[in-house]
Image (cartoon, rainbow, N blue to C red):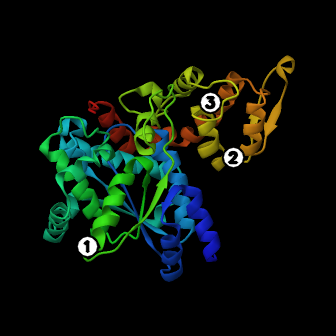
Amino acid sequence: MDIEEKIRLVKEVGEEIITGEDLKVLLKTKKHPVAYDGFEPSGKIHIAQAVLRAINVNKMTKADVKFKMLVADWHAWANNKIGGDLEKIKIVGKYFIEVWKACGMDLKNIEFVWASDLIKDDNYWKIVMSVARETTLNRILRTTQIMGRSENEVLQASQIFYPCMQTADIFYLKADICQLGMDQRKVNMLAREVGEKLGFYKPVAVHHHMLMGLLEPPKSSLDTAERAMAMKMSKSKPDSAIFMDDSEDDIKRKISKAYCPAGQIEENPIIEYCRYIIFEKYDSIKIERPEKFGGYLEIKSYDELENVYKGGKLHPMDLKNAVSNYINGLIEPVRLHFEKDRKAKELLQKVKGFDVTR
């Protein structure tokens, strides 16, 4: 595969790439760059963390990128997830990996690394401390949205460690690329700022789109990263997300209630599901509807969907019904895996019994 094709694949993942020129140089000079993605085990996994993540990872690995997926169990502990119970957090991490096994992620090009293993190495803590010494407290507080927090919130002291640890993760894992969501951009910018000062390098940041929650987005005016965080799916609001163990009835109910204004493309979660998930997995969307409402319709590209929907030729409920069917088809193999595999089934039952804490 030539360089231009690799760049094209990475650009399909990155809503923002910092910087495009750095990416080009990296792909030209390194046969198998290493990308880092970290995930905080914090409860049941939703479709953005599972299916969308698999789509993005697979595009990157197709471009000859190797992935290190960090199971950020200590980070979740610092951030008081699952009531701050580290053993339960580790169980959730194992559950996440089982979901990815079942949803088509390219596991042969991925290495799963646990934060609880990193912390056993003195060199890791040396990097954490070096980042902290090179950074002001105010600068760290400005990154707190990576934890789903506001810098105006009252934070526990453990949460101040989090951005320093996440920055250290990048350099300890020797990651060339930080492939994370737009809500993580502030810590990636911190890594680019301090990397060379600490004798490392400036990692390339590839920030993917944050899939909207199904509820109506906030009206307030926020900066790009803050708005992405406010609009994304939330485990504390179950109807804002499709979870990977949702039943067919759950999926239909949530999508039927979802925000989906007629003719509106921007900030429309159902349109986003089509763009970022369905058209990535299927060649077309088939709309089944009575003849009096336009009859059968097959839409063969996302651009065509935009034109049809903006033109008022497709009713929101007809689109929702089709989207429900396609999303259910993507989640069905995962549900079956957790029904048939004893180990996976036990993990899910345990996770369902945990209290999800913000």
- Height in image: 52 above or below 299? below
Of 49 and 192, nearer the camera is 192
Quadrant position of the C terminus in the picture: top left
Is 257 displayed left or right of 291 in the figure?
left
Q: Mark 1 = which residue?
A: 197
Q: Which one is in front, 353 or 58?
A: 58
Q: Which residue is mark 2?
A: 282
Residue 243 point in image, percent of width and height: 46, 34
SS category of the residue bearing label 2: loop
Pick whichever of labels 1 and 3 is earlier in the sequence: 1
Residue 138's mark?
A: none
The amino acid marked with disc number 2 is Tyr
What is the CA distance from the residue labelled 1 to the residue labelled 2?
A: 46 Å
Q: Which residue is mark 3?
A: 324
Question: Could you tell me the amino acid type at mark 1?
Answer: Lys
Which amino acid type is marked by label 3? Ser
**Label 2 neighbourhood size at 10 Å, few (<14), some (14-19), many (20+)?**
few
Left or right: residue 28 compared with residue 178: right
Q: Are marks 3 and 2 in contact (CB under 8 Å)?
A: no
